Image (tube, helix red, strand yellow):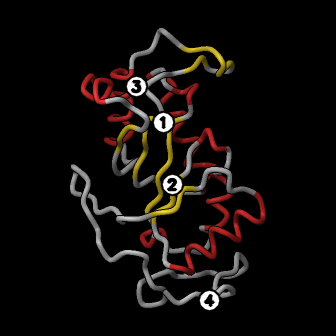
């Protein structure tokens, strides 16, 4: 992989097409809905601030195309800043529903919050970060009044509205996955 550390700058528009940058993997498996997904990506947990933006820009330059973030990481805006000027079709962005947004009436708000922080019009993949929802505003308390099935149904509505191109789950056991 060719590495050019100064090729991406937040001050200028950048196109990250394959003709300009190498890709980490040419392999593109497909999700259940037929959407291709890069086989390898970069998790952004603990990446933030100006150093985080630079790290993400270097990752783009190195060929990364899939970036995984989450509302709970508190760094969606860092990824959004790193993606300024990058052609949206050249990257695959994954984020996850915040723990206080599992109630069906709050799911779309959670999705839209991620979109705003990322500066995107849609997410490629949006995951329910955990099968357990937390009380909105007091995320130290488990919200026993919400079912992962109800959260999933609200995520399906976000999919139908085009806010997300695919949906999934994270940190589910096989039994929990079977229930959804």
Identify the mark at residue 151; answer none if there is no mark.
Answer: 3
SS class of the residue under badge 1? loop
How packed mark 1 is, by other alpha carbons closer than 10 Å (few <14, some 14-19, many 20 or more), is many
**172 up-or-down from 134: above or below:** below
Q: Which mark is residue 4?
A: 4
Q: CA distance from mark 2 to mark 3?
A: 20 Å
Contact, mark 2 vs mark 4 (Cβ under 8 Å): no
User: Between residues 139 and 151, which one lies in front from this camera angle?
Assistant: 139
Mark earlier in primary sequence (4, 3): 4
Q: Residue at x 48, y 20 (%)?
A: 103
Q: Are marks 2 and 3 in contact (CB under 8 Å)?
A: no
Q: Which residue is rendered at x = 50% and y = 41% of the image?
A: 96
First in residue order: circle 1 vs circle 3: 1
Q: Is residue 96 above or below residue 120?
A: above
- Measure the C-alpha gap from mark 1 to mark 4: 34 Å
Between marks 2 and 1, how big is the CA–CA gap? 12 Å
Q: Label 2, on which residue? A: 68
């Amino acid at each position: 992989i060719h590495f050019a550390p100064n090729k991406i700058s937040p001050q200028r528009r950048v196109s990250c097409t394959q003709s300009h940058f190498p890709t980490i993997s040419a392999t593109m498996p497909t999700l259940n809905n037929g959407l291709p997904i890069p086989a390898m990506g970069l998790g952004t947990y603990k990446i933030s601030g100006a150093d985080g933006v630079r790290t993400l820009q270097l990752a783009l330059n190195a060929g990364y195309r899939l970036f995984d973030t989450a509302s709970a990481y508190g760094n969606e805006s860092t990824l959004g800043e790193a993606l300024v000027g990058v052609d949206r079709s050249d990257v695959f962005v994954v984020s996850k529903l915040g723990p206080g947004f599992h109630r069906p009436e709050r799911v779309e708000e959670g999705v839209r919050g991620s979109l705003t922080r990322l500066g995107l019009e849609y997410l490629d993949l949006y995951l329910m970060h955990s099968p357990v929802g937390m009380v909105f505003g007091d995320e130290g308390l488990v919200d026993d009044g919400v079912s992962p099935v109800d959260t999933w149904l609200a995520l399906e509505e976000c999919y139908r509205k085009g806010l997300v191109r695919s949906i999934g789950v994270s940190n589910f056991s096989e039994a929990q996955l079977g229930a959804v």
